[in-house]
Image (cartoon, rainbow, N blue to C red):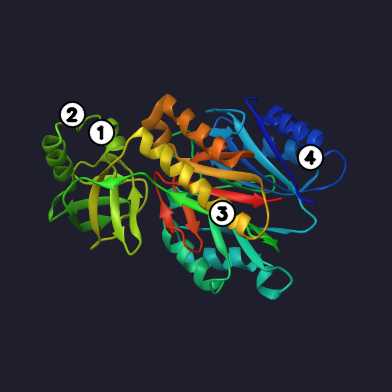
Amino acid sequence: MTDITIASTNLRNREAGEDLARQISAEMKAGAVDAVLVFASADNDYPTLLTALRDGSKARIIVGCSSAGEFTSEMSGTGGTSAIAFRAPEMQFNASLATRLSASHEDASAQLVNGFKGLQSAQYRYRTAVVLVDALAGHTDALIDQLTLSTGGMYQFVGGGAGDDARFAKTHVFFGTEAHTDAAVALEILSNKPIGIGARHGWSPKGDALRVTETADACVVSLNVSPAVEAFEEHAAATHQAFDVEDPLPFFLHNIVGVKSDDGYKLRVPLGISADGGVNFAAEVPTGSTAQIMSTGAESANDAAGAAVRDAIDQVERGGNKPKAALFFDCVATRLRLGEDFQTELATVGRELKTKFAGFNSYGQIVRAEGQFNGFHNCTAVVCVFPD
């Protein structure tokens, strides 16, 4: 029997942890809690919140991250905390922490994998890890690639980049009652029932193909050997859109960049313009890659989220199971772009799932699963469905 409880609160600090613990304990009643995933606004003192949550829920494992918008099937907004708690005798949960992510993604991968138990046992058929990262440290794409190599392709990965309420200054991941920067955490879930993962985005290329000719970390210095900002200025003129270089974010949220890959486009959100005309992004854009400016609408975002849910449910149902609950991750840029229409996207997720869910607006979304659009993305709806 798998018990999964969803909880949320608009309280802060110790009161928030106590409130979440009360909700979890009321739903799960007697018995230990195997694991809790928690997503908390940057307005909290994280250790205080996490300690109260641990003490009140008696959870064996707590992992999570700071967020840029929190939601469940019952609520959504900013400045709060959402959580999902598990008690599943038929599953095994383990947690691991990696530090100094920016120094070496290989070392960070080794630290995470060192905590995985599924590599030493054939007891469980399915191996999944929810991975949460300080995406501002960079190297998330490389980390996910290395995790796949280090686990011999035996695991599927899902997760996202921690947020800080769209400040883009400092983000944290949680491990037990501690909060870490420049780090990643993983919740390993071993099971004999499939966990479904779906990922879709509703963006399509609208601009000309562009060669990324120079980068510096997450800044694209030049496109087609010209200052990167010029490509956006030309696209704005060609599509009759307003583009203010002093306040570019409103334009950028509706004109993100797709980096061409073997299975489509990995989306990257531009955030600002550097003094020399480079464009700063929420994640790295590889030098030498081909990129295009992308476009979408609210209806396309809803359709993508619904399709991601259906993909994940299909994987669960093919195993002869029904959905019990789900995680949902979407980009902070999607929430900022859609505004109130983001509620419609959440309603679409709930309608397709027909069960409860929890999640957060992230600084990038992680997917590595068979038949999915793999890697580290922005503006992509990602769903993880747990079986009954």
Residue 49, image x and y in percent?
68, 35
Tell me the SS state at disc 3. helix
Dot 1 amino acid type: Phe
Tell me the mark number nearer the camera, choosing from 4 and 1: 1
Residue 212, image x and y in percent?
21, 57
Q: What is the spatial separation of the Cα atoms under label 2 and label 3, in whole angstroms?
A: 42 Å
Residue annotated with mark 4 = 57
- Residue 317 is tagged as none
Left or right, residue 360 beside residue 61? left
Kindly indicate whether the residue at mark 3 contacts the one at mark 1 (C-beta within 8 angstroms): no
Assess disc 3: are there few (<14), some (14-19) or many (≥20) residues with their C-alpha within 10 Å of its C-alpha. Answer: some
Residue annotated with mark 2 = 242
Q: What is the spatial separation of the Cα atoms under label 2 and label 1, in whole angstroms?
A: 7 Å
Tell me the SS state at disc 1. helix
Q: What is the spatial separation of the Cα atoms under label 1 and label 3, in whole angstroms?
A: 36 Å
Left or right, residue 158 beside residue 21? left
Residue at 29%, 36% in the rendered image: 254
Dot 3 amino acid type: Asp
- Residue 251 is tagged as 1
Q: What is the spatial separation of the Cα atoms under label 4 and label 1, in whole angstroms?
A: 44 Å
Kindly indicate whether the residue at mark 1 contacts the one at mark 2 (C-beta within 8 angstroms): yes
Relative to 169, is 115 above or below? below
